[in-house]
Image (cartoon, rainbow, N blue to C red):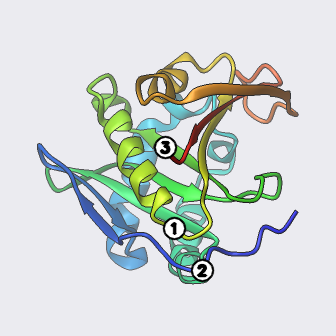
């Protein structure tokens, strides 16, 4: 399987309706606010996000410091989710070692104060559009543990198909060890 970086990138800023914007992270300008958003979201994220166990100011700084290089290389496209000028989460397009050729995966998380308002669905819809603009991308996937029903609602709303289930090694407290892979094929 060839998981070489993608040759071209998506838009660095996507303005959606009602004050919702996805924009490439700015490592210096976003650090303090993004760290605060993660801090306030720790209990909300802990069940599903293994990286939260190592959360610290230094880890957040390192994450943000690597975003521009990953974007430029085509390996990952990470966005701040911004609502009415405030960072409220993160989303992105990426390819992992086990991602099939021609497929790009969407990931997302939001501060608990803004969940249940359709923001993740709107962000994911915008990422689908950006993903399909990339050369060679024939399908977009969303992958989550089968027990994460909130994450499952997003691909279901967007017309993804439940593509397959696969075992995985649980790395976060609520994970069952089985992933649901949703797929949306390019028309």
Local packing at callout 2 (Cα closer than 10 Å; few below 14, some 14-19, many 20+) is few
122 over 7 or under it: above or below: above
Please give the residue where the numbered disc 2 appears in the rendered image: 7
Tell me which numbered mark, 2 or 3, is placed earlier along the sequence.
Answer: 2
- Residue 154, image quadrant: top left
Do residues under tags 1 and 2 come within 8 Å of each other at their CB atoms? Answer: yes
32 over 84 or under it: above or below: below
Q: Which of marks 2 and 3 is in front?
A: 2
- Residue at image point 76% right, 52% down: 99
Q: In this view, does 99 lie to the left or right of 167?
A: left
Please give the residue where the numbered disc 1 appears in the rendered image: 134
Residue 174, can we see it? yes
Indicate the position of residue 18 as horizontal and vertical percent values.
Answer: 11, 43
**SS type, badge 3:** strand
For this orientation, the residue located farthest to the front is 187
* Res. 115 mark: none
Tell me how far mark 2 sits from mark 3, CA to CA: 23 Å
Indicate the position of residue 48 as horizontal and vertical percent values.
Answer: 63, 31
Tell me how far mark 1 sits from mark 2, CA to CA: 8 Å
Q: Is residue 169 left or right of residue 157?
A: right
């Amino acid at each position: 399987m060839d998981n070489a970086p993608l040759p071209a990138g998506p838009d660095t800023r996507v303005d959606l309706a009602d004050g919702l914007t996805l924009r490439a992270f700015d490592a210096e300008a976003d650090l303090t606010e993004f760290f605060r958003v993660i801090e306030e979201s720790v209990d909300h994220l802990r069940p599903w996000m293994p990286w939260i166990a190592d959360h610290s100011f230094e880890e957040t700084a390192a994450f943000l410091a690597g975003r521009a290089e990953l974007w430029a290389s085509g390996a990952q496209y990470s966005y701040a989710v911004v609502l009415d000028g405030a960072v409220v989460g993160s989303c992105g397009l990426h390819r992992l070692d086990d991602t099939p050729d021609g497929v790009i995966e969407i990931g997302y998380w939001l501060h608990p104060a803004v969940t249940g308002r359709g923001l993740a669905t709107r962000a994911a819809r915008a990422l689908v559009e950006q993903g399909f603009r990339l050369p060679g991308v024939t399908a977009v996937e969303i992958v989550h543990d089968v027990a994460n029903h909130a994450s499952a609602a997003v691909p279901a709303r967007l017309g993804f198909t439940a593509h397959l289930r696969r075992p995985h090694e649980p790395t976060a407290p609520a994970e069952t060890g089985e992933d649901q892979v949703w797929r949306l094929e390019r028309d």
